Amino acid sequence: MARTTENERREDARTAVSWPVRLWVDEQLLVGEALDVSAQGLCVLTAPTEALKRGASHRIDVMVGAEPPMALPGEVRHAERLRLP
């Protein structure tokens, strides 16, 4: 597949979304928002936390519209702090 831009490493285009999500890290519940989605990934924004570690797998509940939540397994590929100007 063609890459989305020259500087973009992803092979699949991302689609902007605004879906509430719940991440289950052990027994801890993190609430966040999915910002974009592709065939291979989901970008989730949460409050700053040290609980998410790169390479760890967690259950993610994604709420899309009035449908019941989709429970999906997810692996943390990146855990970065948002840098505001």
Image (cartoon, rainbow, N blue to C red):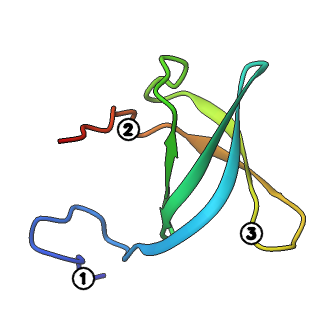
Q: Secondary structure at mark 1?
A: loop
Seen at 34% across and 34% down, the residue is 80
Q: Residue 78 got which mark? A: 2
State the image coordinates of residue 68 (x, y, percent, origin top left). 90, 64
Residue designated by label 1: 2
Tag 1 or tag 2, which sits nearer the N-term? 1
Tell whether 80 sits left or right of 21.
left
Q: Secondary structure at mark 2?
A: loop
Q: Residue 64 got which mark? A: 3
Amino acid type at image mark 3: Val
Amino acid type at image mark 2: His
Q: Could you tell me which quadrant the N terminus lies in?
A: bottom left
Tell whether 47 sits left or right of 59.
left
Label 1 Cα crowd, 10 Å radius (few <14 / some 14-19 / many 20+): few
Q: Are marks 2 and 3 in contact (CB under 8 Å)?
A: no
Q: Could you tell me which quadrant the C terminus lies in?
A: top left
Q: Residue 17 got which mark? A: none
The CA span between labels 2 and 1 is: 23 Å
**Closer to the camera: disc 2 or disc 1?**
2
Tag 3 or tag 2, which sits nearer the N-term? 3
State the image coordinates of residue 62 (x, y, percent, origin top left). 72, 57
Q: Secondary structure at mark 3?
A: loop
Relative height, residue 28 to residue 47 (above, below): above
Label 2 Cα crowd, 10 Å radius (few <14 / some 14-19 / many 20+): few
State the image coordinates of residue 52 (x, y, percent, origin top left). 52, 25
